[in-house]
Amino acid sequence: MIELPISVERIQEIIPHRYPFLLVDRVVELEEMKRAVGIKCVTANEPWCVGHFPGLPVMPAVLILESMAQVAAVLVLMSLPEREKHLVYLAGVDSARFRRPVRPGDQLRLEVEVLQKRASACRVKGVALVDGERAAEAEFLATLVERAGRP
């Protein structure tokens, strides 16, 4: 049984991302190798706010995709018995659509669902929501690789 929510400190034990590239603050729902829901609180202190765009900061679309992919990585790794021996790499993005801007003050609800699982890869569908409204969606291909050495 996985204890929820999964805190940012625990997430850092599961995936190797760190500030400023750790883009998920907690995981609030997780069904092993089925689905997960993560939360990203978007703040005015984000490094991209200065230049994307000055005076009207909008979270870059690629970072929204990355935040969904990080929740997917937590889902996949938490479903493995020896998760510390593996990494999840993003191998592909399909059908990405962006429906509304994400701005400082927004809370992204990142919902991911495993569509297909193979031995070393899986296809995941992700949806990013703000206040229940779809901000972005995409399908991801993720590959599982052995971790060479843990930093």
Image (spheres, grey):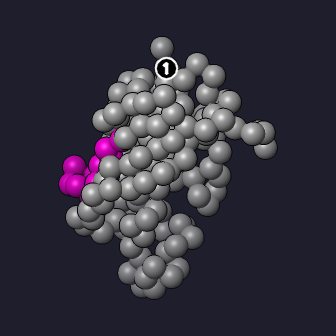
Q: Position of residue 88 (x, y in %)?
A: 55, 41
Q: Nearer the viewer, residue 99 or 138?
A: 138
Residue positioned 27% across, 57% down in the render: 95
Residue 126 is one of the magenta-drawn residues: yes
Which residue is the site of mark 1? 2
Residue 142 is one of the magenta-drawn residues: no
Q: Quadrant of residue 111?
A: top left
Q: Position of residue 105 (x, y in %)?
A: 39, 62
Q: In this view, does 67 lie above or below 3?
A: below
Q: Position of residue 149 (x, y in %)?
A: 78, 39
Residue positioned 68% across, 30% down in the render: 85
Q: What residue type is labelled 1?
A: Ile
Residue at the extreme bottom: 54
Q: What stretch is highlighted in magenta?
A: 124-137
Image quadrant holding the C terminus, namely top right
| Secondary structure mainly formed by the magenta segment | strand
Q: Is residue 31 left or right of residue 132?
A: right
State the SS at label 1.
loop
Q: Quadrant of residue 45?
A: bottom right
